[in-house]
Amino acid sequence: MPIVKKIKIFLSILFVFAPFQINAQQTINKVLDEYLSNYIKIKQIPSVSAGLLVNNEIKWTNSIGYSDIENNVSVSDKSLFRIASISKPITAIAIMQLWEKGILNLDIDIRKYLPYFPEKKYKFTIRQLLNHTAGIRNYKEGEFDSKKLYLTTKDALKVFEYDSLMFEPGTKYLYTSLGYNILAAIIEEVTKKPFDNYVAESVLKTAGMLATRTDKQREIIPFRMRGYEKNVEYNFINAPLADLSIKIAGGGFLSNSKDLLLFAKALLDNKLVDETTLRIMTKRTRLKNGNYINYGLGFSLEVENDTLKYFGHAGAGTGFSGSMIISPDKKIAAVYLTNIRDINLGEPAKDILNIYSTGIQPVITQTISQELMRTYKSSGMDSTISKLAFIYKYQKELFNFGEDGIVILAKNLLELNKVADAIIYLKELVKLFPKSFKVMSILGDAYLIDKNEGMALRYYRNAAQINNSDQRINELIKKLSKK
């Protein structure tokens, strides 16, 4: 066949195939747009922003809703969300860049780099800080939504630096944002630069994340969003004021969907750390007893049949939630961000990847506690129990019917001082979840509030039979048994 004819045939195939690719992506984008529109309506949240990366190219982003409800300000692609614990991979990458350069050793006592940090009963390492096995405590009451300004990383360390370790490092896993302050302090000590400056130069700029920055509560930051919560009756309220200087490295960055996808792209392109380093960061952590945890060095992991399926991180901060997940084999990533903190948000980032893979819209579950509270407010507890039974029998797949979602109504009723109704509701839940520690323990709490110590003790004992390691329940059983 003449060469000219071969070229003509090739070009004719190319021109047929290229529009097909474009149309296929347009179809996926339309499905994703519909998903996001349905998601915000069903979940009843102020806003949501999301994006998809395919073969290291941003294929889709969208933002829907309000960044400021009171002033009727719409969310946009420029809107900056608190990304909460999605900050941890950013800090972890900064640490691993220094390790690649030979500046840091992951497995020696951190006091080599921070001699001013108080000595503990046990030595712990940078690796153990990265994977939350160092024994550093998590928040005490009031620290999650701390209002105090800490001017320096050293100041933030003072929050916990004299506290004892919770356990021998390497023996257990205890998730903590405070421990990442030590990593920030190490970065400052070895680079002689402020943490946020170093990260901006070495991580954010390299990845092209031009909008991402630390959240400084007192500064005027263009496009920074307002954060929200829902009260016990499921009305929007402003999230409490929080100064994130207590946890910049572990939960103090602002970003948007596009920038987080650029972060994922830079990871997959090996622009931030090399492939071997990323592989080290995304290996499961082995504890000293031989058990594994699905957390690496700054990344949460999802493992299937001993093979890494996704890595990334979720975040839930004051007034905000989100998630970033990356599939290293498929070279795809998804992000979602929202300006509300709520446990009923589902897993939109996974939904987005599934839509890309299958083209099928997933079921977006409704918040059952919200639906039942609506019935309770309008028609009382008898109707609420009837609604619960109907949903359980006919609509279970349409609601978040796990025990975490179902017990929230009881907690809200207790907060509203509707103790008798909370007990009625919880007794119905016992029938549906007879092996639920949470249902049993909350029912015990309800009876204790109702000053029925005998019934409280009964349900605390039931809870202990399901889980005998809960310190609070064991102490309550001991206390009530003496009476």
Image (spheres, rainbow, N blue to C red):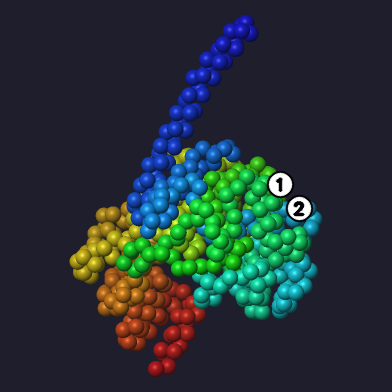
The residue that disc 2 covers is 100
Q: Earlier in the sequence, mark 2 or mark 1?
A: 2
Whole-percent x, y for residue 477 in the image: 43, 85
Distance from label 2 to label 1 (Cα)? 9 Å
Contact? badges 2 and 1 (CB < 8 Å):
yes
Residue 266 image offset from top left, x and y in percent:
64, 44
Give the image quarter of residue 333.
top right
Q: Residue at x 47, y 56 (%)?
A: 225
Q: Decide: is 127 above or below 268.
A: below
Element assignment for label 1 = loop
The answer to whether residue 180 is visible is: yes
Three-letter code for the amino acid on which mark 1 is drawn: Asp
Q: In the rendered image, which residue does mark 1 sit on?
A: 274
In this picture, residue 286 sits left or right of residue 99: left
Q: Residue at x 72, y 77 (%)?
A: 118
Residue 167: image quadrant is bottom right
Query: 218 or 347, which lies in front?
Result: 218
Any part of residue 172 in sight: no
Quadrant housing the N terminus: top right
Up-down: is 18 above or below 90? above
Q: Please report the residue visible at 77 percent of the width from the left and 72 percent of the height from the top.
A: 115
Q: Looking at the image, which residue is at 39% across and 94% down?
A: 483
Q: Position of residue 285 (x, y in %)?
A: 64, 60
